[in-house]
Image (tube, rainbow, N blue to C red):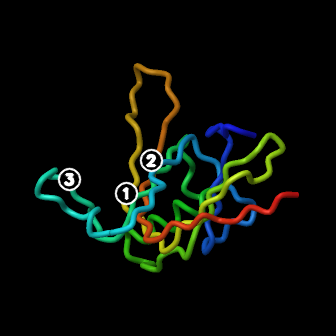
Amino acid sequence: MYPPAGFHFKIVFKGIDDPHQSDSGFQSISGLEAYTDKKLHQTSEISGSSQDEPGYSVLVLKRAARNYNESPLLRWIFSHFNKNNLDPLPEAQIELLDDNHNPFMAWTIRHIIPKSWTLSELNAEKSEILIETIELYYRQLLISEVIKK
């Protein structure tokens, strides 16, 4: 599978009760990045850009909106926003899958806390899928070893 296609993937969160991996499918995942000096990624007077939480990167997940009761991830996020639970998730594994649905490449992010949740526009004049965007801070990115079967 070379070059790899970026459309067949999943993410599995560790630390939330999701035995059926109901929160593993997303339309898109972006924000995987690694760099040598986290200070370079903080507020820069020259560019005017800023990182909300120094030392953290932001993972952006998009999918069709899910019902709160059917999504352990949404329940964890909103319990964090409502200050009922401030524990970070220990890690999540993102897997790029091959034609047989086996991992081809994988990345692990660690120390995850929610940044934001947004919902696309509710509009009675359009027939569009309602999209939710989840932004998560993470502190560490590791390349995970994939065992070939």
Q: Which mark is residue 20?
A: none
Q: Amino acid at mark 3?
A: Ser
Q: Which residue is mark 3?
A: 49
Q: CA distance from mark 1 to mark 3?
A: 18 Å
Q: Which residue is mark 2?
A: 133
Is 6 drawn above or below residue 116 in the view shown? above
Disc 3 packing (10 Å; few <14; some 14–19; many ≥20): few
Q: Which residue is mark 1?
A: 116
Q: Amino acid at mark 2?
A: Thr
On the rendered structure, is 109 left or right of 3?
left
SS at mark 3 in the image: loop
Q: Amino acid at mark 1?
A: Ser
Q: Residue at x 44, y 61 (%)?
A: 34
Farthest top residue?
A: 125
- Contact check, label 1 and label 3, Cβ < 8 Å: no
Q: CA distance from mark 2 to mark 1?
A: 8 Å
On the rendered structure, is 116 left or right of 100?
left
User: Tag 2 or tag 3, which sits nearer the N-term?
Assistant: 3
